[in-house]
Image (tube, grey):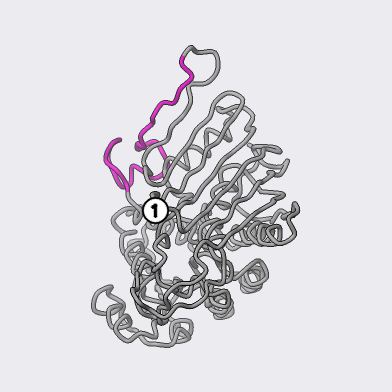
């Protein structure tokens, strides 16, 4: 990193894997100068890596990286790279995350960081040993209305939280001819919807309310076979007619009963969490409902810029009021001047990039980190274990996370 005469810091950016998410990270870095000029950061897109030649070429020609190659080690070995975005498939996350830490590179990595808690813990230990900053792709926590929801819960405006309900329902695999990508192969993805979607939901709950202490779970595989998709071609949204059928090795649906920790802002609250990748109807209905003794609130990503809050006790009409996102919520004002003009998914990644870079610069840290990823992985692993044992399974609290605590 280099600080210029005008006080602006130039940060060298490296990218590993130039798929959709890698492109999104790149745009997020580039937009920092426009959305957060007061951050006084100038990201420099130094080097990208992708084994697909066409993608490596796009990194230079389209995204604006100075260099690109097939081997991710080229990114980690480049002395001009200060931070690395790791956007490769799940089965490579732990390997690359550990390598990035050992190379002394601060890294922003997509979830799940590992195929279960052991791989995630290995990355956490490597990051701690190297003293590097980490940030995790838990993008839903950055929605301005979610930030606001977290604030009103901590302030006690909903009273004592009694119970919660969360869901992450997607339809990207609802077609039985949806391609058998790496996401359905246990050796490559680890678990299925537990790691892919439930991990996001667990983080959302823990960010807003505090650690999940105990779970009991059930899982199911709705489609046991799918047509194979060669690695590196297409996406997990692809539909293949008359393809060779191969077995699906992990779960399509998962549900959990949860008990929150007594150290949360919602002491000993209970609830239900569900996730599905085969739901017919919901496109990306990712939501959370919070119920307290003096009010309740609910949010759904499909209507990302809206929060519904109850009127509270003692009134004749205790129904919900729709509150639109506005400049007083989180970073909304950085993107839109007033309520009713909506933010989008990409904007959440710009916020995520800002929090990551801010932490790398040694300023106040609000980013999700590898400890948050480990905490979510422990809950997911406990759920996977519970689905086998049909018993309640504990999840130990992880210190150093950004999970909610008592105000």
Q: Residue 341, percent across and down? A: 26, 40
Q: Is residue 389 above or below residue 309?
A: below
Using the image as rendered, state which of residue 402 and residue 7 is in the foreground: 402
Q: Is residue 319 magenta?
A: yes
SS of the residue under disc 1: helix
Q: Residue furthest front?
A: 242
Residue shown at the point (66%, 68%) measured from the top left: 121
Q: Is residue 377 left or right of residue 275?
A: right
Q: Position of residue 310 (x, y in %)?
A: 48, 25
Q: Is residue 364 visible?
A: no
Count up the numbered dots.
1
Percent coordinates x, y for residue 104 in the rendering: 55, 77
Q: Is residue 137 magenta?
A: no
Nearer the observer, 239 or 307 = 239
* Quadrant the N terminus occupies: bottom left
- Residue 117 seen in the current view: yes
Q: Whole-percent x and y of residue 158?
A: 56, 28
Specify the quadrant of the image occupied by residue 153: top right
Residue at image location 34% in from the left, 68% down from the top: 26
Residue nearer the viewer, 182 or 104: 182
For the C terminus, give its image quadrant: top right
Q: Quadrant of residue 405?
A: top right
In the rendered structure, the answer to whether residue 51 lies left or right of residue 97 reads left
**Secondary structure mainly formed by the magenta segment:** loop
Return the residue at label 1. 348
Residue occupying image coordinates x 37% and y 57%:
350
Q: Nearer the viewer, residue 388 or 360?
A: 388
Residue bounds of the magenta highlight:
317-343
Task: Judge the density around disc 1: few (<14), some (14-19), many (≥20) Cα neighbours within 10 Å.
Answer: many
């Amino acid at each position: 990193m280099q600080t210029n005469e005008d006080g602006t810091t130039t940060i060298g950016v490296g990218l590993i894997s130039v798929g959709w998410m890698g492109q999104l990270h790149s745009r997020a870095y580039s937009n920092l100068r426009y959305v957060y000029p007061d951050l006084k950061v100038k990201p420099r897109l130094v080097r990208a890596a992708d084994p697909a030649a066409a993608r490596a070429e796009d990194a230079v020609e389209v995204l604006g990286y100075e260099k690109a190659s097939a081997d991710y080690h080229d990114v980690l070995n480049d002395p001009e790279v200060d931070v690395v975005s790791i956007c490769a498939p799940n089965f490579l996350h732990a390997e690359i995350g550990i390598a990035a830490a050992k190379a002394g590179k601060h890294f922003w990595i997509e979830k799940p960081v590992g195929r279960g808690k052991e791989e995630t813990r290995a990355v956490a230990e490597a990051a701690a040993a190297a003293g590097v900053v980490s940030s995790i792709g838990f993008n839903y926590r950055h929605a301005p209305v979610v930030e606001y929801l977290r604030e009103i819960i901590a302030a006690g405006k909903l009273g004592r939280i009694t119970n919660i309900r969360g869901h992450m329902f997607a339809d990207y695999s609802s077609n039985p001819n949806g391609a058998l990508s790496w996401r359905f192969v246990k050796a490559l993805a680890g678990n299925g919807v537990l790691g892919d979607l439930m991990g996001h939901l667990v983080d959302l709950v823990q960010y807003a309310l505090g650690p999940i202490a105990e779970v009991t779970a059930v899982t199911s595989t709705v489609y046991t076979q799918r047509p194979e998709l060669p690695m590196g071609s297409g996406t997990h949204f692809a539909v293949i007619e008359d393809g060779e059928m191969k077995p699906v090795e992990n779960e399509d649906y998962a549900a959990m009963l949860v008990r929150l920790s007594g150290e949360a802002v919602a002491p000993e609250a209970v609830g239900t969490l569900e996730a599905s990748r085969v739901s017919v109807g919901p496109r990306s209905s990712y939501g959370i409902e919070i119920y307290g003794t003096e009010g309740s609130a609910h949010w759904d990503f499909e209507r990302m810029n809206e929060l519904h809050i109850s009127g509270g006790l003692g009134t004749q009409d205790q129904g919900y009021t729709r509150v639109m996102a506005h400049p007083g919520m989180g970073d909304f004002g950085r993107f839109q001047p007033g309520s009713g003009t909506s933010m989008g998914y990409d904007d959440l990644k710009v916020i995520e990039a800002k929090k990551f870079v801010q932490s790398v610069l040694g300023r106040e840290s609000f980013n999700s980190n590898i400890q948050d990823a480990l905490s979510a992985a422990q809950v997911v692993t406990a759920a996977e274990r519970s689905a086998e044992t049909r018993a309640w399974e504990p999840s130990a609290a992880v210190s150093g996370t950004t999970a909610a605590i008592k105000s």
